[in-house]
Every structure is written in C-alpha cells, then in structure tokens.
Amino acid sequence: MLRCFSENGIASWKDVNAGCVQQAFGESANRAIFATYARKFFAYLVEQGITAANYSGILPTVRYPKRVPSVYTYEEVEKLLLCVDRNTPMGKRDYAVLLLAVRLGMRASDIRLLCFPNVNFKNRKISYVQFKTSVPQTLSLLPEVEEAVRDYIENGRPETDEPYIFLTYRKTQLSRSAVSLIVDKYFKQAGIDPGDRHHGSHSLRMTFASELVAKNVPFEAVSRLLGHEDKASVSHYVVLATESLRSCALPVPGATGKFADYLKEE
C-alpha cells in the first residue's frame, strides 16, 4: 500500500483518499491479507488523529471457498488399521488412537487429553469437555473401540500415576502434534497415496463424517456427533454427500442462438 502511495506521488497522509486506497488494494498480491491489515492500520491512524477518515471501509470482504474436506475410502481406512502392529505397547496405543479418530470422530486434542474418568466402560460412554470449544460431549463407546482402549490400558500402557490414558514410551503426556504424527506414520506405512488430500488426524475425523453422510444420517446429527455448536457448520457436510448430490444434477440444456450456430460451423 505504501509503495503504491509513493508511486502515485502521495507524500502525506493528508493526501490519502479512497481512490488511492482502492488502487492499492487492486494491485495487492493477496487482497484478503491487504484488507485485514489495512482495516487495523487505518483504525489506528484515525484513533491517533493522523487521518480524518478510515478509508479501509471501502474495501470489500474477500472470501475464499472452503477446501473440500479430505476423506478416505473404507478400503483405505481398513488398510491403515491393518498395518498397525498390535503386539507391541506402542502399537496397541496407536491402534486405539486411530479408532477414536475414525470411528468416533474425536479431535486430536481431545484424544491426547483423554483421562480415565472420561471413559465409562460400564455404561460404554466417553464423556469429556472439548478442548477447542469448551462444550461437553458424550459419545457411545463402540465395542471395537472399547476393546482397543482396554487392550492398551491393560497390556500396553506403562505403570504410572499420570491421569492421561495415552502416554509416550517415557510415561509422559502426548504432545500437541503427537496424534497427527501417529496418523501420518501409518498412512506412510500402509502405502496409501493421499494425493492432494491431507493425511493427519483431521482427515480421519472428516472420513467419519463422510461415512455417516453416505448412510443418510441427517446433517444435524452428524454435526452433534462431531461436537459442533454452530448450526451453520451443517452446510459444510453437504460437500461430503457425493452420491446424494448426483441425484440433484440437471441435464445439460441444448445449445441455442449464436452458440448453436457456432457449433454447426465447427
């Protein structure tokens, strides 16, 4: 912005106007970042009495389309799970972590912070306060997941007074990136080609959501299972309903007018 002002002979803030701000915005390489910081910058200038008006108000809100969630097929997920060596302590831990992500859709942060009071084996429930949203969440402890968690606790987890269920081999709490690193490790070990898809723990969470949508589970129910409070987030799952969206496709209309004439010439 300042370079654009200089190139146009603007040497004082008194000479700045809406036109030159708009021009700088149009020439910026990243308009979203330009608009964000220009608003903060001009708000400061007005507050300090350096400029009389906040010219950033003319800048539009730049929105970029959300990236399609990364999901994996049933075959890829099974291949991922089968490559885990469940005969070792770390293998038992990693297998349980993978299942919590892909069978229950839990976030990585909630998996690593899971403590013994959060898991009720008697009633087959997992209850916890979500780290990201601070909203309580309760999920059914599926038999497959229960078996894996029990196996790790009874046969793989080191003896320690640590309250967290999943630990490192040093008997310490998992780091912030540990769950995603675990998932990434087995994607590589299984030889799954992610292409342009993400291959961290969030991709397993989205795969869980995709499977529910494919089974015609209402979007609102999927949103609740993922622990979302914002109703607007429901629309995010529409892109996962590939087969349902196919039924909404309209036939391509026939060519008319000048376009039809152009095709005939071809």
Image (cartoon, rainbow, N blue to C red):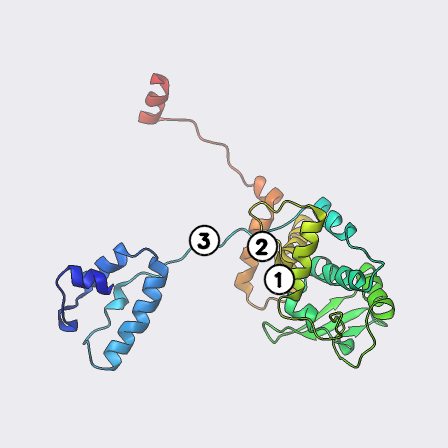
Residue 163 in view of the camera: yes
Please name the residue that numbered disc 1 is placed on. Answer: 223
Spatial CA distance of label 1 from label 2 is: 8 Å
Q: Is mark 3 on a helix, strand or loop?
A: loop
Residue holding disc 2? 237
Give the amino acid type for the residue marked by disc 1 in the picture.
Answer: Ser
Location of residue 186 in the rendering, given as x and y in whole percent from the top left corner: 70, 54
Badge 3 density bin: few <14, some 14–19, many ≥20, Cα 10 Å = few
Viewport quadrant of the N terminus: bottom left
Q: Residue at x 86, y 72 (%)?
A: 122
Residue 30 occupies quadrant? bottom left
Please name which of the two marks, 3 or 1, marks the residue nearer to the observer.
3
| Placement of 23 over or under 55, stated as above or below | above
Question: Residue 135 location in percent, x, y?
Answer: 62, 74
Q: Where does label 3 land, which residue? A: 65
For the residues labelled 1 and 2, say whether their Cβ atoms are less than 8 Å apart. Answer: yes
- Label 2 vs label 3, nearer the camera: 3
